[in-house]
Amino acid sequence: MVRNGKTQSGKQRYLCKICKTTRVANYTYSAYQINIDQQIVLLTKEGLGIRSTARVLQISTTTLLKRILLIAKSIKQPMIPIGKEYEVDELCTYLGNKNRRIWLVCALERF
């Protein structure tokens, strides 16, 4: 890393010689914290809504929604073994308007 000028707020900017990306040593905006994604997942599991999660983490709701979409895209679909019994529940909802209907399905293995 080598120095690469300053940001508009006067913070030192650094350039990586290998990947050519720039970074700032100490970000003031909370959305750039390393463990923010884990905190988003934890607060979502606890049942906090979008606005309350954004307020607790001190980030904007728009940034929170973008992060949630990135986290959701990184989740891999689980393998479902054949020959076992499952309890299935489904929920129909809409994305934006009623023309974009989606189904959410949850399956739990019976013991």
Image (cartoon, rainbow, N blue to C red):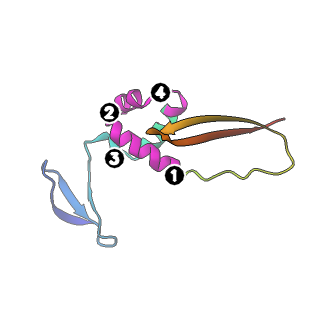
Q: Amino acid at mark 1?
A: Lys
Residue that mark 1 sits on: 73
Residue that mark 4 sits on: 48
Q: Secondary structure at mark 2?
A: loop
Whole-angstrom CA distance, mark 1 to mark 3, is 19 Å
Q: Secondary structure at mark 3?
A: helix
Q: Residue furthest front?
A: 99
> In x, y percent, where is residue 63?
34, 42
Q: Is residue 66 left or right of residue 85?
A: left
Residue that mark 2 sits on: 58
Q: Which quadrant of the figure contains the C terminus?
A: top right
Q: Are marks 4 and 1 in contact (CB under 8 Å)?
A: no
First of labels 1, 3 by sequence position: 3
- Membership of 95 in magenta stretch: no
Mark 1 Cα shell of 10 Å, populated few (<14), some (14-19), many (≥20): few
Residue that mark 3 sits on: 32
Whole-angstrom CA distance, mark 4 to mark 1, is 20 Å
Q: Secondary structure at mark 4?
A: loop
Q: Secondary structure at mark 1?
A: helix
Mark 2 Cα shell of 10 Å, populated few (<14), some (14-19), many (≥20): few
Whole-angstrom CA distance, mark 4 to mark 3, is 21 Å
First of labels 4, 1 by sequence position: 4
Identified at 13% across, 47% down, the residue is: 9
> What segment is highlighted magenta in the picture?
44-72
Q: Amino acid at mark 2?
A: Gln
Q: Amino acid at mark 3?
A: Tyr
